[in-house]
Amino acid sequence: MATRGVFQLTKLRLNYCEFSGSSATVREYIGNGPLVAWARKHDNVAIEVVVRNGKHPYVEAEYQHNTTRHQICLKNKPDTKAVEKVFDTLRNRSGRKISKITQPIKTSTPSIQGVWTPFLNLQNEPKFKVQLMGSKSNME
């Protein structure tokens, strides 16, 4: 997610195995060129490819504020589009942990204009007539 027009993702680390079947789609994504195309399209993101034999594939994302890292497992993804969708999901995140809002939000500094309601100050407004246009019976 862009904060003030700047995407927060700075680095993706792609870990995979050279031999296991669970890494087959990731190896295809790296070898056939979609990874290079994605990297050229998003040139502000550094991509590091790490071989870890005997382990399931995963991608780890690092963000600008360096407080959290997100890991998503890429084990047995059906096709390269699914891997690219994971990359796009990590790129569009802010990197911050999701916090649940459990109580209504209250402020100690209310709005200077006050709380708006649709019936505010209608008693002071001048009376007006409502007319339907379109038929002669309504115009009389």
Image (spheres, rainbow, N blue to C red):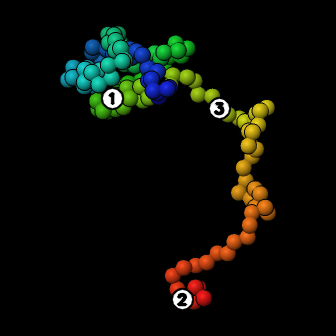
Q: Secondary structure at mark 1?
A: helix
Q: CA distance from mark 2 to mark 3?
A: 58 Å
Q: Secondary structure at mark 2?
A: helix
Q: CA distance from mark 1 to mark 2?
A: 64 Å
Please tell me which of labels 1 and 2 falls first in the chain: 1
Side of 22 relative to 67 (left or right): left
Contact between marks 3 and 1 (CB within 8 A): the answer is no
- In this view, the residue in front, 14 or 91, is 91
Q: Nearer the viewer, mark 1 or mark 2?
A: 2
Report which residue position mark 1 lands on: 84
Residue 53 seen anywhere in this rendered image of the structure: no
Residue at 20% of width from left, 23% of height from top? 32
Residue type, mark 3 in image: Lys
Q: Nearer the viewer, mark 2 or mark 3?
A: 2
Q: In the rendered structure, find residue 100 and report the number of the disc placed on it.
A: 3
Side of 133 relative to 114 (left or right): left
- Give residue 34's quadrant in the image: top left
Residue at 27% of width from left, 14% of height from top? 18
